[in-house]
Image (cartoon, rainbow, N blue to C red):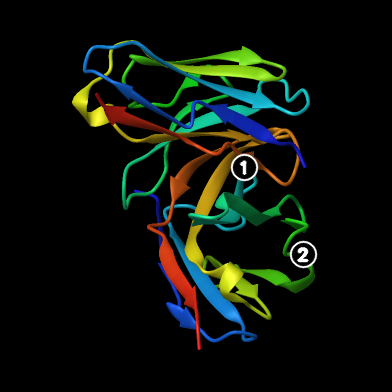
């Protein structure tokens, strides 16, 4: 199975901060990576697919980059509604595997 | 509007079978551009992909190795739904179970639609 290592596992940030979350795959996955946001008690919500494509309806402050083994999710200016947990997911090979999550908390 | 409606018991006894159903509205379980997936989430295991079923001229099932020996997916075209059966459950199978649609092709898949999730507890 492809292992997805996400970092950091948590971070504290203020409204307006630029936030960067990384995901590293244990082998090359091309651009077969997507990012999700999950709020407590809610369903994961797709933000980014194909490593850098913004899902329809997602604010442009979210962006993704990377290919191969190293990927980044960036929130350019953190908003109050962005405090949540973020997950990456690789779909290059089955089983599709998730990162361990990054919890973004209010500083 | 496309929706996934999950149903099934929230409590299952150890060694018994966990059964969940996901009813699809606004899309087709036989879609040639989607796959229908079960994912679970627990504090100890995080998000875990259990497998998928999809139709490309015939039905395909992919299962996670960790559950392959005791899991079955059943697409039901008449009811436009798919189901999960997980046999011989233990407390390790206690989790929130999600059904989800993945869209894409080849190796590029992404999960753009999720059911609301169902907490299933394995306990006597």
- Tell me: residue B19, above or below residue A82: below
Q: Which mark is residue A60?
A: none
Q: Nearer the viewer, residue B7 or B106?
A: B7
Category of crowding for the residue at label 1, using alpha-carbon neighbours closer than 10 angstroms: few (below 14), some (14–19), many (at least 20): some
- Tell me: residue A29, above or below residue B115: above
Question: Is residue B21 shown left or right of residue A10?
Answer: right
Q: CA distance from mark 1 to mark 2?
A: 24 Å
Chain letter of the residue beneath label 2 in the structure image: B
The total of numbered circles placed on residues is 2
- Tell me: residue A65, above or below residue B5: above
Residue B65, percent from left and from top: 78, 57
Q: Quadrant of residue B38?
A: bottom right
Chain letter of the residue beneath label 1 in the structure image: B
Identify the element where label 1 is drawn: loop
Q: Nearer the viewer, residue B89 or B112?
A: B89
Q: Quadrant of residue A5?
A: top right
Residue A45, percent from left and from top: 40, 39
Tell me the quadrant of the picture where the C terminus of chain A can be found.
Answer: top left
Category of crowding for the residue at label 2, using alpha-carbon neighbours closer than 10 angstroms: few (below 14), some (14–19), many (at least 20): few
Residue B122, percent from left and from top: 52, 78
Q: Which residue is mark 2?
A: B68
Mark toward the viewer: 1 or 2: 2
Q: Which residue is mark 1?
A: B33
Residue A6, percent from left and from top: 56, 29
Tell me the quadrant of the picture where the N terminus of chain A can be found.
Answer: top right
């Amino acid at each position: 199975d492809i292992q997805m290592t996400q970092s950091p596992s948590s971070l504290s940030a203020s409204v307006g901060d630029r936030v960067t979350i990384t995901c590293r795959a244990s082998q090359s996955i091309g651009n077969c990576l997507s990012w999700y946001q999950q709020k407590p008690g809610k369903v994961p919500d797709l933000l980014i697919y194909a490593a850098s494509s913004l899902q329809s309806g997602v604010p442009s402050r979210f962006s993704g980059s990377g290919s191969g083994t190293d990927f980044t999710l960036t929130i350019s200016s953190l908003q109050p509604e962005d405090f949540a947990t973020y997950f990456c997911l690789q779909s290059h090979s089955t089983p599709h595997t998730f990162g361990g999550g990054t919890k973004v908390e209010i500083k | 509007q496309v929706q996934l409606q999950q149903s099934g018991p929230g409590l299952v006894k150890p060694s018994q079978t966990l059964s969940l159903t996901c009813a699809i509205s606004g899309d087709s379980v036989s879609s040639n551009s989607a796959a229908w997936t079960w994912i679970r989430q627990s504090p100890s295991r995080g998000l875990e992909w259990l497998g998928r079923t999809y139709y490309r001229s015939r039905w395909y099932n992919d299962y996670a190795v960790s559950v392959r020996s005791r899991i079955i997916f059943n697409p039901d075209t008449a009811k436009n739904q798919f189901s999960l059966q997980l046999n011989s459950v233990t407390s390790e199978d206690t989790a929130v179970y999600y059904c989800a649609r993945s869209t894409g092709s080849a190796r590029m898949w992404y999960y753009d639609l999720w059911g609301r999730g169902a907490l299933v507890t394995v306990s006597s």
